[in-house]
């Protein structure tokens, strides 16, 4: 059997018609397939590869750590330098109240950990969250996902979960003395790029503080420079109680984290002891890779280039068939008339060497979230291919 046949027969499928490109290597801003085709990558593994594919510092860190030790013991029991060092680096670049990191394997596990922490710390049960939000696919994360189409087949889900529109006063009004936490994406990604109103976010923060409710920001997709600042919340001068990280956190390796104050995180240590545990979360190779990736992101000053690149996309994405272009840094949604049209255009783009995708709750939008290392010439090429395909 060929790899494609094995993929279709022996691997679980997640959609009826997978893209099915067979990639043999990836480097920088490009993917290479088994037939010798090159693709300019417009999605970077869905906001994972912010510093490009296989950054040499990340590859070196992986090799170095592999020569020292791989898995030794579940997270949180032994002192493992890559975890401790990366936790410190993250804390140094976060507000003082976000100084304690719990590493997980994935974004959805970060969501689960944060929801548990909120219930444990407040002694309350209810959760307020947003329509059109995505926080992961496990049961807790699915319960706070903002779309009935995806939730319904898996009921019963968590009770006491209240969905309201992002940026709506109803969401703030729904917070009361039963609410353990509010969880939102700092910038809603899968709804086709929706930033918060600053005033709404400030009022949300105040209502959470007034009612003793914990505020959780999910920056799994919008963190690590994607929006033009290191963190999405840095645009708004509002600090959450718990921050969720993932995707680019691992520099291309699987890693997630929830981050809170040391005092808050202490809740997971006792009554019950081992309140949240993981075998592989914070794997030393992933932490070494992630730390090298974050250092490269900062040292190469990639974040400072994001605003110019965003502007260039806007200047070049002009076509009568484009209904709107929404963006927050290099998280860009190009809205067309219908999801069918998006699929057609994406297929044409692929034929011309451009790899892109759509958004979960906005299938009428093309996703543009390339590595932040994309050059001006590559942006011009990408926009030419999109215009041609349109
Ligand atoms: C905003 C957001 N939160 C959580 C997740 C879940 O992360 P993971 O797929 O690593 O579980 C995603 C993944 O796309 C995401 O975009």
Image (cartoon, rainbow, N blue to C red):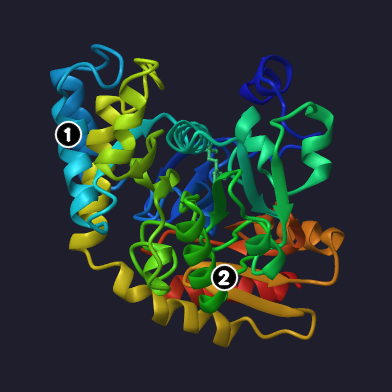
Q: Quadrant of residue 168?
A: bottom right
How would you rate the neighbour count of disc 2 (Cα within 10 Å): few for under 14, some for 14-19, many for 20 or more? some
Q: Residue at x 22, y 32 (%)?
A: 83
Which quarter shows the N terminus?
A: top right
In the rendered image, which quarter is residue 81 located in? top left
SS at badge 1: helix
Whether 155 is drawn above or below 301: the answer is: above
Instruction: Using the image as rendered, state which of residue 36 and residue 286 is in the foreground.
Output: 286
Viewer-nearest residue: 93 or 211: 211
**Horizontal and vertical percent for residue 345?**
76, 63
Asked whether the viewer can see residue 56, the reply is no
On residue 124, the disc is none
Give the mark, 2 or 1, whose residue is nearer the N terminus.
Answer: 1
Which residue is at 73% across, 69% downward?
389
**Which residue lies under the disc numbered 2?**
195
Label 1 residue near ligand 1, CB within 8 Å: no
165 left or right, relative to 262: right
Name the quarter showing ligand 1.
top right
> Is residue 114 or residue 121 the one in the foreground?
121
Q: How many marks?
A: 2
Q: Quadrant of the C terminus?
A: bottom right
Q: Is mark 2 within 8 Å of ligand 1?
A: no
Residue 99 on image: x %, y %: 24, 47
| Residue 136 shows in this picture | yes
Left or right, residue 380 beside residue 322? left
Q: Is residue 384 left or right of residue 157?
A: left
The dot on residue 84 is 1
Q: Nearer the viewer, residue 82 or 79?
A: 79
């Amino acid at each position: 059997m060929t790899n494609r046949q094995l993929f279709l027969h022996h691997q679980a499928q997640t959609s009826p018609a997978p893209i099915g490109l067979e990639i043999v290597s990836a480097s920088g801003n490009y993917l290479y397939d088994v037939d010798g085709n090159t693709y300019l990558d417009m999605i970077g593994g869905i906001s994972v590869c912010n510093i490009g594919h296989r950054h040499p510092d990340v590859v070196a860190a992986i090799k170095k750590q592999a020569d020292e030790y791989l898995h030794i013991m579940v997270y949180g029991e032994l002192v493992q330098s890559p975890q401790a060092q990366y936790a410190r680096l993250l804390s140094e670049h976060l507000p003082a109240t976000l100084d304690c990191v719990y590493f997980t394997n994935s974004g959805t596990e970060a969501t689960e950990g944060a929801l548990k922490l909120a219930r444990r710390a407040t002694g309350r049960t209810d959760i307020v969250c947003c329509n059109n939000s995505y926080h992961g696919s496990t049961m807790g994360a699915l319960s706070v996902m903002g779309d009935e189409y995806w939730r319904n087949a898996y009921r019963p889900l968590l009770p006491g979960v209240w969905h309201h529109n992002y940026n709506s006063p109803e969401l703030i009004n729904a917070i009361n003395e039963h609410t353990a936490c509010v969880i939102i994406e700092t910038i809603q990604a899968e709804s086709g790029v929706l930033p918060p109103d600053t005033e709404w976010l400030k009022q949300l923060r105040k209502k959470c503080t007034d009612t003793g409710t914990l505020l959780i920001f999910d920056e799994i997709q919008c963190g690590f420079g994607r929006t033009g600042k290191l963190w999405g919340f840095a645009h708004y001068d509002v600090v959450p109680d718990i921050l969720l990280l993932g995707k680019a956190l691992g520099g291309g390796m699987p890693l997630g984290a929830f981050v809170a104050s040391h005092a808050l995180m202490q809740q997971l240590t006792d009554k019950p002891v081992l309140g949240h545990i993981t075998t592989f979360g914070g794997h030393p190779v992933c932490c070494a890779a992630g730390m090298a990736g974050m250092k490269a992101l900062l040292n190469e000053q990639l974040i400072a280039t994001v605003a110019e690149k965003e502007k260039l996309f806007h200047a070049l994405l002009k076509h009568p068939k484009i209904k709107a272009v929404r963006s927050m840094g290099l998280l860009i949604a190009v809205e067309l008339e219908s999801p069918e049209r998006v699929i057609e255009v994406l297929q044409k783009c692929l034929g011309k060497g451009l790899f892109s995708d759509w958004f979960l709750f906005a299938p009428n939008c093309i996703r543009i979230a390339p590595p932040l290392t994309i050059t001006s010439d590559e942006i011009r090429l990408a926009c030419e291919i999109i215009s041609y395909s349109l």
